[in-house]
Image (spheres, grey):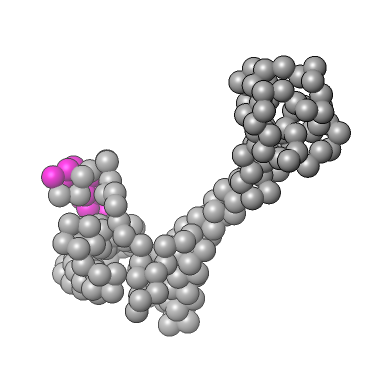
Amino acid sequence: DGCCCLNCWRAKAVPGTCRRGRCARHPSEFGRLEGVCTLGKRHYFFFPHGVSRFLPTRALWRRRTVRRLSMNYALHILTMISIYAVLGMSLNLLLGFGGILSLCQASFYGLGAYVFALLAVDASFSFLAASVLSFLVTGVTALLAGSIILRLRGDFLVLATLSLQLITFSLLYNSTSLTHGPYGISGIPAPDILGVSFASQLRITTLALLQAGAVWWCL
């Protein structure tokens, strides 16, 4: 089998599993040679004196890791863009088509998100069931609030929507026993639609893009 000492590696010897006390090719090498742990194409070399070092394959592994993390970050940003695009289209529906300046889109967005998270985590609802119930709760709340706020006009309407935004934020942020307040809700399961799991970042981004596209098509 091959040798794993430093001199053999410099001579581009094939990595082996030498576990002998001394290198057969280079007797001057001393110390215990632990051999080579091969993980696919990534070789972790052990050198004398019990000192372990990564060889140039470490740079390749680091580049691949950075590239993978960069891709996940880019997909996350694209997901957030899709979500905020839906919020922007909701504002365009009110202001662009209806001429109503509303400042409480984020309140209904946060209410729907918290309802979905609480149903999925605490009540163990499925993705579709939690989504439908969150839509209903948010829709009923918007209907009740709109029936009162839409009686106002001009600056009073803007101030009323801003007040609703602040009230909703205060309730969600300070209700630590229900919404966990600033600590947030962890352990939200990945979306699962008709047996198809959207656990990867790529699939989540695809789902967000399809949702934004569907909203844009409806408008």
Expressed as whole percent of the image width and height from the top left, the position of residue 173 reads 23, 44
Residue 174 covered by magenta stretch: yes
Q: Main secondary structure of the magenta part?
A: helix
> Where, quadrant-wise, is the N terminus in this rendering?
top right
Res 86 visible? no
Expressed as whole percent of the image width and height from the top left, the position of residue 31 reads 67, 17
Decide: is 142 above or below 50: below
Expressed as whole percent of the image width and height from the top left, the position of residue 207 reads 45, 70
Left or right relative to 58: residue 186: left
> Where, quadrant-wise, is the C terminus in this rendering?
bottom left
- The magenta region covers 165-177
Could you tell me which residue is drawn at 72 percent across and 23 percent down?
Answer: 22
Decide: is 186 above or below 202: above
Decide: is 5 above or below 121: above
Left or right relative to 8: residue 204: left
Expressed as whole percent of the image width and height from the top left, the position of residue 164 reads 23, 55
